[in-house]
Amino acid sequence: MARIIVNNPGFLSTIQDGGRFGFARYGLPRSGPMDWISFEIANLLAGNKRNDPLIEITGDFEATFEGRAFVSVVPGRTILNGKSLERFSAFRVKSGDTLKIFCDRGFRSYLAVNGLQIEEVLSSKSTCLPARFGGFGGRKLLSGDIIDIIEYGNSEIKDRTLVCDIDRIFGNAVRIVKGPQWNLLKNPQTLESEYTISPDSNRIGYNLEGERLDLESYEIVSEGMIAGAIQVPPDGLPIIMMADHPVTGGYSKVANVIYADLPVLGQKKPSDRIRFEIVDLDIARKLYMKYKSWIRAIEFELCNSSKDVYRVNVGGKGFTVEVKEIG
Amino acid sequence: MGERAIIVKFGDEISPDAHKMVIALDRFLAGLKTLFEWIPSYASVTIFYDPEVIGHEEIVKIIGQFRPEEIEEGEKETIEVPVMYGSKYGPDIEFVSDLNKMTVEEFIKFHSSFIYEVWMMGFMPGFAYLYGYTGSKVPRLERPRKYVMAGSVGIAGNQCGIYPFDSPGGWRIIGRTELKIFDIHKNPPSLFDLGKRVRFIPV
């Protein structure tokens, strides 16, 4: 068994997988990554499945390895034994190697490790910080924490680098669709003014500072919420629900950040500025499909880079063909 | 609500009728093999879906097949919750008793005389909003306590609730139970669920 030893966990490092599904009715947050795009690319680069557990890092991070492992970091700057590595790369590490990660762009990095050993609790390996369970003992990682890794053996995957552009998530444009209580908003144009992420923002929610929103009524009968929901409490300053948000809420929800742009928020730190852009629901749906299929294309590329695989079109249907030499 | 959720609403008020409809839709959905998850609340059911797995139109079609009058009410399980009322367990019991113009003893009898029902889950994992109390509406604390112990029984307005974890809280605390409200080693992990009934037993 190989191991990763945390030297510096940064502001907040937690284990996250694709999220905890099926327990929302009991009040459990879904958790999962704050930036699903970087999360999925990191996993795929490391030869994992898209939704496997990995380490979500907020700020900087440092760890040392024991044994052999295959890892990747997205999108932070990675330094292995003092040597800077290319972005979007996956690489082998061995005993004594020290990995440093700096968030030179954005705020969160994803460290994916092939074969990271995390116990499943309630169908997920994500840390549920609000209820203190799952992930690594239900808590954030601390200096000295050790996580087991299945030793990386017959290295089928070689060190590799992905050509990839995710610059969009470092921008400040956040697309939204109108929410269930949009019609209660008396100054709708204000929502498209600039907002600043407040210091008391976290994985539960982002509090925004800026122009106050004027609503006919701030309180509603509590109802279900999703990540990206923008609630407005009576002080008029919006709160965006993030990965660990409570599943129900009683403030008016004027808008909803589209799924494709949740990573833009995930990469924002306190004092960063954002600007909402209203789009139609139809566009939000198209963007959902667009980014999902973009990730699928990356998955296809990475999963098959070591094999001789072709995509062919026969009679309007797509097929994947693997070419093997007949011995 | 966005490209990943649909809210099915039964009015804009907390009422027994809305609750009945929510229970019926919850049962209807539970009887299907669905490709989505949902959260029942006071007067609505929020359905979450992955647009790659199921389309918005398909969900609307499923909801269109919902016939509340055809859904059987079914048995409702009653959970007995032993409560240590007052003293250090319930620091606000005098306040709430005064509000109801009762002695503490009278109030304990009063509060434990009702059969409560879970009308919504939320706020934190395992937290149930319980309806049944018909006394004076209880105002929340002006400033929430920084620390409320797990198992604390609170009142706010005409709702009761039990804190599953140590946490900050603004409800008036009248007692505490030793029952485990949320247990990750059980499936389901929550003692409470929509429609379950609760009886408080003074100990």
Image: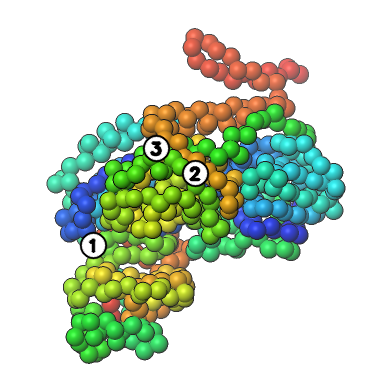
- The residue positioned farthest toward the top in the image shown: A315
Residue A159, percent from left and from top: 78, 35
Element at label 1:
loop
Image depth: mark 1 or mark 2 in front: 2
Image depth: mark 3 or mark 2 in front: 2
Q: CA distance from mark 3 to mark 2?
A: 17 Å
Residue on which disc 1 sits: B76
- Amino acid type shown at disc 2: Glu
Q: Which mark is residue A194?
A: 2
**Can residue A105 be seen by looking at this rendering?**
yes
Q: Quadrant of residue A280?
A: top left
Measuring 41% from the left and 43% from the top, which residue is drawn there? A191
Q: A53 or B42, which is in the foreground?
A: B42
Residue on which disc 3 sits: A177
Q: Which mark is residue B34?
A: none
Pointers 3 and 1 in contact (C-beta within 8 Å): no
